């Protein structure tokens, strides 16, 4: 963390809303993308990103500098996403006949490009993974958290981080191979 971010955190903890606004601007895209990938919904991600920062603002006086601010924010975002997933399960249990909203199958012009196709496949494969596997892959590979940060964010021990990450990578690789006829390349 750089000095200016540390200054913003200290000022925001004392109630400076402009300093907190600077922190939001710095971290909101990362938080949004993390939540969107976890939940698969941009609308829910936008709402939960806002909720994450509200929770962070309220909890800021309890934040400790030993924890990376970004890791702390992602932990708050993760907890908010887990709450939403629990609510979804409750709703599905209450209304089993309801169908999920259909996904628009029409490809966008960018999907015609090879790199966009690969990215779309990766997004699909991630969405199919169980929540624990998707979550740990996103935190490690997209957000770049170290193993100790993963353990702190997910509230598990380092050995569990390594085994979950290995299983998640294996599952993603298996899905990729299936989508490509058993090979790693197109």
Image (spheres, rainbow, N blue to C red):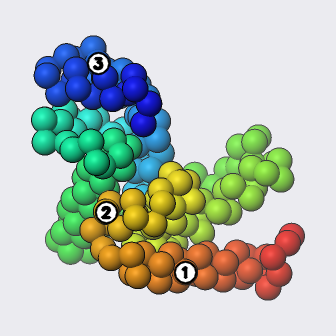
Q: Name the residue under label 1.
A: 166
Is residue 59 visible from the viewing direction of this image?
A: no
Of 7 and 132, the residue lying toward us: 7
Q: Residue furthest right?
A: 186
Q: In this view, does 86 lie to the left or right of 26?
A: left
The tally of labels here is: 3
Q: Which mark is residue 152?
A: 2
Do the CB atoms of the residues marked 1 and 3 lie less than 8 Å apart? no
Give me the residue at 19% from left, 42% from top.
63
Instruction: Identify the mark nearer the N-term, 1 or 2.
Output: 2
Q: Point out the image quarter for the N terminus.
A: top left
Give me the residue at 13% from left, 22% from top.
14
Q: How far apart are marks 1 and 3 (CA)?
A: 39 Å
Q: Where is residue 146 in the image (x, y as percent from the top left)?
A: 48, 60
Instruction: Identify the mark nearer the N-term, 3 or 2.
Output: 3
Is 12 situated above or below 130? above
Q: Is label 1 in a helix, a strand or a loop?
A: helix
Give me the residue at 13% from left, 42% from top.
62
Q: Is label 2 in a helix, a strand or a loop?
A: helix
Q: Name the residue under label 3.
A: 19
Q: Is residue 50 left or right of residue 119?
A: left
Viewer-nearest of labels 1 and 2?
2
Q: Is label 3 in a helix, a strand or a loop?
A: helix
Instruction: Identify the mark nearer the N-term, 1 or 3.
Output: 3
Is 79 situated above or below 10? below
Q: Where is residue 160 in the image (x, y as percent from the top left)?
A: 39, 81
Do the CB atoms of the residues marked 3 and 2 lie less than 8 Å apart? no
Of 1 and 34, the residue lying toward us: 1
Q: Where is residue 172 in the image (x, y as percent from the top left)?
A: 61, 75
Q: Quadrant of residue 31?
A: top left
Give me the residue at 40% from left, 64% from top.
148
């Amino acid at each position: 963390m750089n000095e200016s971010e540390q200054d913003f955190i200290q000022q925001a903890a004392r109630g400076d809303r402009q300093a907190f606004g600077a922190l939001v601007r710095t971290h909101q895209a990362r938080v949004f993308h993390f939540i969107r990938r976890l939940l698969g919904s941009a609308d829910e991600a936008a709402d939960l990103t806002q909720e994450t920062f509200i929770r962070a603002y309220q909890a800021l006086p309890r934040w400790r500098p030993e924890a990376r601010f970004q890791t702390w924010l992602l932990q708050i975002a993760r907890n908010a996403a887990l709450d939403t997933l629990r609510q979804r399960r409750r709703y599905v249990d209450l209304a089993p006949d309801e169908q999920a909203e259909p996904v628009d199958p029409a490809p966008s012009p960018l999907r015609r490009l090879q790199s966009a196709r690969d990215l779309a496949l990766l997004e699909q494969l991630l969405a199919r993974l169980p929540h624990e596997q998707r979550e740990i892959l996103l935190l490690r590979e997209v957000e770049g958290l170290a193993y100790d940060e993963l353990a702190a964010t997910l509230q598990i021990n380092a050995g569990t981080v390594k085994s979950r990450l290995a299983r998640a990578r294996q599952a993603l690789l298996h899905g990729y191979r299936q989508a490509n006829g058993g090979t790693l390349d197109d």
